[in-house]
């Protein structure tokens, strides 16, 4: 019993040992966890203690409070004053003196109406008792004095001023007309010809002969020699016919393609009466009983060297004669002396001419050596003579395509002009006098 009892007790004790070991292990694990958690807590606490020590005693408060305290601990320059301090400071600040704004409905002075109707439109004050009629009379007197100093009478000056004002009014209102070719008669009479007259009268002192050979009315074809490096001879012929003819006829020039391809010159030429040098255009103008002028030499004549001056070049294929014969218009030979000397052409820079698309690039004694000053023409003395008309009506319209008739008439016109040039050169005393 004893043994068995002892064994039983031993067995019970042996069975109890594992249970005790398990409980001891569990207690040990719980103790370890508790120790770990305590150490972790102590570490976080120590870290928090270090952060608190670094930031100050208020580090445990929220972030906003910490920033406020940091600002409070900062310098006075960056410290933000409280609202009460700002109010106190504003109360102590001296207030500016108040200004009274005038009421325009009550405080504005009452203006009396001015007697001068121009006072409200002028940027300066005029006397209230100024009479507009007296002002106009003063201006008229000044204009009369200026006109008398320029050699114009008072009536002539008033007429010109009135004409200029009427011209401006018609241009503004569009009360003017142009023909199918773009010719503006009013512009040519009022603007274009007056611009050319000083050059015609003062600079070249043009002398006109045989103006009676140009018919008073009806169609006619003026054929002239061409020269001068720049075609100024056409402009002077236009002024001569209009100013010297009793009926002040307008002449319609025939120009080359280059004239109308130029940006500004083309439009101006159209307005002043120049049209394309084509048989169809020439025939239409002659059918309308216009006075037409042509320079058959073309660029060969205007751009010839100074050594070949007053020697006529070839007259083309006789297209102008064909138009005259077809319409029955008389041909009037025109000889011009003096144009050869305005730009004496000593050389031709062909490479520069090809670069810009010009028929020639002139080299004169003044151009391009003097630059823009070289564009001023020399003041040579001019003589323009209109010869006896050569009739073409007896040939008939059917002869306009006959080469023999065209050649004979062309040769007759060319020889007439050439012989007239020689005779005028013999009469001329000097190039400039």
Image (cartoon, rainbow, N blue to C red):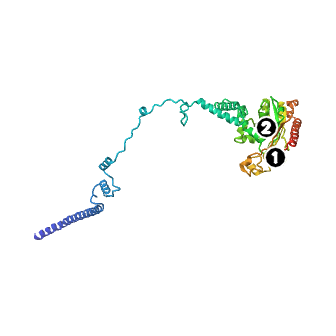
Where is residue 206, by image quadrant? Answer: top right
Mark 2–mark 1 Cα distance, whole angstroms, equals: 20 Å
* Residue 126 numbered mark, or none: none
Where is residue 397, by image quadrant? Answer: top right
Q: Is residue 351 visible?
A: yes
Q: Residue at x 82, y 35 (%)?
A: 222
Report the side of 149 relative to 84 (left or right): right
**Eye-nearest disc, 2 or 1:** 2
SS at badge 1: loop
Q: Can you say which quadrant of the picture contains the N terminus?
A: bottom left
Q: To which residue does mark 1 refer?
A: 304
**Count of labels in the image:** 2
Give coordinates of residue 318: x percent, y percent: 84, 38
Mark 2, Cα crowd under 10 Å, few <14 / some 14-19 / many 20+, is many
- Which of the two discs, 2 and 1, labels the residue nearer the N terminus? 2
Report the side of 284 relative to 15 (left or right): right
Q: Is residue 227 visible?
A: no
Q: To which residue does mark 2 refer?
A: 237
Q: Residue extending furthest bottom?
A: 3
| Image: 270 above or below 50 | above
Q: Nearer the viewer, residue 167 or 253?
A: 167
């Amino acid at each position: 019993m004893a043994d068995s009892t002892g064994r039983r007790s031993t067995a019970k004790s042996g069975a109890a040992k594992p249970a005790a070991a398990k409980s001891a292990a569990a207690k040990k694990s719980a103790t370890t966890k508790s120790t770990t958690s305590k150490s972790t807590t102590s570490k976080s606490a120590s870290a928090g203690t270090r952060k608190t020590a670094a930031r100050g005693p208020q580090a445990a408060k929220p972030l906003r409070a910490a920033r406020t305290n940091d600002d409070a601990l900062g310098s006075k320059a960056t410290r933000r004053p409280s609202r009460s301090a700002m109010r106190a400071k504003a109360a102590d600040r001296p207030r500016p003196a108040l200004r009274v704004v005038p009421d325009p409905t009550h405080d504005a002075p009452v203006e009396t109406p001015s007697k001068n109707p121009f006072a409200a439109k002028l940027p300066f004050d005029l006397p209230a008792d100024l009479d507009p009629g007296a002002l106009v009379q003063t201006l008229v007197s000044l204009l009369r004095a200026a006109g008398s100093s320029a050699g114009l009478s008072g009536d002539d000056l008033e007429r010109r001023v009135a004409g200029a004002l009427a011209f401006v009014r018609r241009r503004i209102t569009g009360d003017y007309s142009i023909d199918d070719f773009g010719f503006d008669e009013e512009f040519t009479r009022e603007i274009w010809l007056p611009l050319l007259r000083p050059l015609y009268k003062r600079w070249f002192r043009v002398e006109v002969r045989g103006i009676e050979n140009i018919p008073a009315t009806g169609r006619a074809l003026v054929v002239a020699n061409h020269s001068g490096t720049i075609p100024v001879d056409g402009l002077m012929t236009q002024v001569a016919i209009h100013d010297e003819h009793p009926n002040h006829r307008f002449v319609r020039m025939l120009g080359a393609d280059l004239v109308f391809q130029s940006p500004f010159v083309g439009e101006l030429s159209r307005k002043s009466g120049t049209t394309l040098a084509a048989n169809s255009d020439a025939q239409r103008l002659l059918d309308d009983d216009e006075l037409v002028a042509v320079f058959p030499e073309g660029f060969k004549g205007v751009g010839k060297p100074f050594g070949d001056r007053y020697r006529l070049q070839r007259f083309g294929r006789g297209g102008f004669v064909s138009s005259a014969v077809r319409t029955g218009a008389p041909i009037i030979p025109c000889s011009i002396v003096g144009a050869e000397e305005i730009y004496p052409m000593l050389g031709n820079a062909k490479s520069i001419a090809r670069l810009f698309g010009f028929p020639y690039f002139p080299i004169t004694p003044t151009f391009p050596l003097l630059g823009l000053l070289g564009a001023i023409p020399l003041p040579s003395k001019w003589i323009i003579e209109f010869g006896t008309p050569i009739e073409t009506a007896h040939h008939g319209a059917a002869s306009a395509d006959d080469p023999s008739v065209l050649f004979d008439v062309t040769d007759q016109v060319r020889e007439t002009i050439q012989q007239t040039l020689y005779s005028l050169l013999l009469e001329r005393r000097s190039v400039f006098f």
